[in-house]
Image: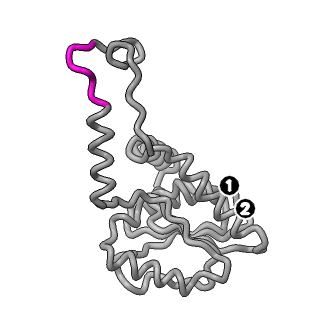
Amino acid sequence: MDEKLAADWVRRWDVQQERYVADREERFTVVIDVVEHVCRDVAEPLVLDLGCGPGSLTTRLARRLPHARIVGLDDDPFLLALARATRPERSDIEYVRADLAESGWLKWRPVDAAVSTTALHWLRPERLAEVYRDLAVALREGGALVNGDHLYDEQPAIRELAEVVKERRRPVPGSTPTRTGRPGGRRWPRIPC
């Protein structure tokens, strides 16, 4: 695959994902901070990026943890091709086709850290629990799974709070938005948390 074309596709992917996932870069930073902390005393840590896509998080991990072996796992051959074409010049980054929705994907032990950002929410809850169990066995003592994904929680109290917030943010009928976007120059009501 042409490196320049692949780099353009990954850049476009990152822009699209930033619109889809609020504070994506900050999320990446937190995930990597945790991995860096967990691996601080490990000479050559092994880090798995679950559902790595085109390698956006994997690449950032490689920059911050140059001594780590990083394995990006995904089931999409096109995304893996993009990741391989744009990976930093490092021999210790590996991209492997693996389907997390099926048993038998975990072939590495011991794992120092496993990360994911926008992949695990696609797994059925029963399958996700199996992935967590597999990792619990594979992670070394003191290792960590850092899931920066947005898992949806349909608890009634959360849904009710979201409705209250939405209702309180509606403009007052008959008012006109100001430069700040607030109707009639008034502040939005504060919602106690």
52 on left or right of 183 = right
Residue 127 image-quadrant placement: bottom left
Q: Main secondary structure of the magenta part?
A: loop
Horizontal and vertical percent for residue 3?
A: 52, 50
Tell me the amino acid under the disc marked 2: Pro
Who is closer to the viewer here, 5 or 152?
A: 152
Are dots 2 and 1 in contact, CB under 8 Å? yes
Q: Name the residue that disc number 1 marks.
A: 63
Bounds of the magenta segment:
169-175
Within the image, what quadrant is residue 101 found in? bottom left
Location of residue 74 in the rendering, given as x and y in whole percent from the top left corner: 43, 68
Identify the amino acid type marked 1.
Arg
The label shown at residue 66 is 2
Image location (x, y in percent) of residue 23: 49, 44
Task: Please tell me whether mark 1 sits on a helix, a strand or a loop.
Answer: helix
Q: Identify whether 151 is placed above or below 38.
A: above
* In front of the other: 41 or 88: 41
Query: How many residues crowd around disc 1 within 10 Å: few (fewer than 14), some, or many (20 or more)?
Result: few
In the image, 154 versus 75, the foreground residue is 154
Q: Is residue 113 left or right of residue 73?
A: right
Let me know if residue 46 appears in the view.
yes
Q: Is residue 192 above or below residue 127?
A: above
